[in-house]
Amino acid sequence: MYDEMDRSAVRALKKRKLKYQQIAEALGMDRRTVKSLAEGPIERKYQRARPPAKADRFREAIVSWADEDVPVQRMFEMATEDENPYDGSRSAFFARARLFITEHVKDKAERFVRFEGLPGEYCQVDWGEVRNFPFLRSPGETRYFLAMRLKFSRKSYVEFTRDMKIETLIRCMLRGFESFGGVSWVCVFDNMKTVTIGRDAAGNPIWNPTFFRFSQDVDFHPEACAPASGNQKGSVENLVGWVKSNFLKGRKFVDDNDLVAQNAAWLADKANGSVSQAHGQVPDEVFLAEEKRKLTRLSTSSADYGLFSTVLSGPESLIHIDSNRYSIPVGYAETPLTARLRRDVVDFYSDDKLVAHWIRHKGKRARPFINPEHFESLFELKPRARVMVYRDYLIEQDASVAAYIAELCRRYRGAFGPHILALYEHCNEYGTEELGIACALASEHGAYGAEYVHALLRRPRPCTAHGLVVVAGAPSQEDLDRPLDEYERYVEGGPGDGN
């Protein structure tokens, strides 16, 4: 047992800049004992140890839940639902929880100062990750979620995804802004690589060019937390933890559709529809009353927005985008272009001029997407290239056309060029569907040649039956009809044949 004099001696030697090992040797103590005495209080009051309260083993969880704005009532429910459940009284749990929360709040206040921000000013954004997601049908999968929270009202948006790519981040943020009805003035991020790619010599963020262009297009100012200062985005960190502990904890999901439905209900009822401990009010009510009108109008949508990037094609006039290759006019080969990657289309620009427009292909395809018109200026010098490009284009359009061309080329071998050129013209004139029908009919009759397909395309179509047209003021059919016996007399030349 060491008394106050021992502690004082240790501290006196410590002030002389002696190391713990030197103090231990001087006083005949263990080095760990010296360290404990040096860092502890000079006066220490000893009291009889009491058995720990039943709620004490939940102290760490209670502190974490408090950071996530979980009500004490919900903490009690979660403790009783634990694998090793709390079996004490409700009042005892509440008392210990309040004590732990009070101590934690005091400790946090000493470490950093919390600020609330103005209405519409700050939106804090971060990713969460959940491995072995609790799916009933496909256990073991990983899911991510983007959490967004407006600092002032605490209104939140959460979306689950399969990855954390930059396009996923941007389109999730746009859907979040759509749910808010506008854009905050500032968005605060952790140092995720899709947002910042490092720091310069002065310690300022180096922004990802695609993301920075997005921030300018949508009109918000990006801010990145200082390295190792995650508390600068404490509110959204709390939201990420809250999603894991309050939404995911104890829940099961059939599949992704069920996850989307339960997430929407939780956001509406719990995250945004119940009282927040941060300000003692309902986030949705604060948002509608004070914050929504302060947001900047959103000028685009998650479907229409085109991610910006600078691209360069090779000598083949092909540009790699999202694991696929798209053709551009040969005049822009090996020239820097601007690509705008929208949800369903891909556009390429030279300055402000649109040079190529493509329907976006979501999967990965080995063959490139070719528009023959992009190579017309080259075909004058390379006639065979025209035939081969036209053939590849036609094969991609329809299965019946592809089968017909395969057999046509086999039969004509080196002389199929004129047929391919003619079929390409027919495709442009009659359309892919009509050409496919004609090729299928020609194949059934073993008629291989552009002239047979052309004849089928030119054949008249069956007339469409039309209903009887009634002319206003004309006599009715009943007035025009004559009795059958009168008609017979007329035919036989009997009486009344002059009628």
Image (tube, rainbow, N blue to C red):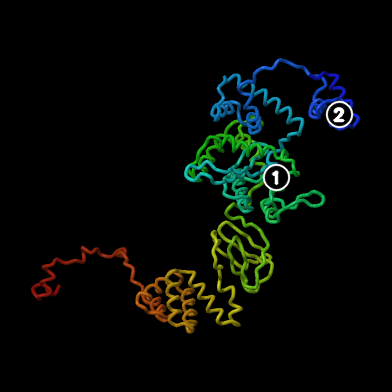
Which one is in front, 329 or 292?
329
In the image: residue 310, left or right of residue 267: right
Expressed as whole percent of the image width and height from the top left, the position of residue 292 reads: 64, 40
Q: Dot 2 lies on which element?
A: helix
Q: Answer with mark 1 or mark 2, whichever residue precedes in sequence.
A: 2
Give the CA separation, mark 1 to mark 2: 47 Å
Expressed as whole percent of the image width and height from the top left, the position of residue 115 reads: 73, 35
Amino acid type at mark 2: Glu
Question: Please, which residue is most extreme toward the top here?
Answer: 48
The residue at 54%/68% (across/down) is 367
Q: Quadrant of residue 44?
A: top right
Quadrant of the rendering where the C terminus is positioned: bottom left
Residue 185 is at least partly visible in this image? no
From this view, report whether residue 400 is shown above or below residue 157: below
Q: Are marks 1 and 2 in contact (CB under 8 Å)?
A: no
Q: Nearer the viewer, mark 1 or mark 2?
A: 2
Which one is in front, 312 or 469?
312
Q: Residues within 10 Å of mark 1 (few under 14, many from 20)?
A: many
Question: Please, which residue is most extreme toward the bottom here?
Answer: 415
Give the total of numbered labels.
2
In the image: residue 306, left or right of residue 139: right
Amino acid type at mark 1: Asp
* Residue behind mark 2: 25
The residue at 9%/75% (across/down) is 492
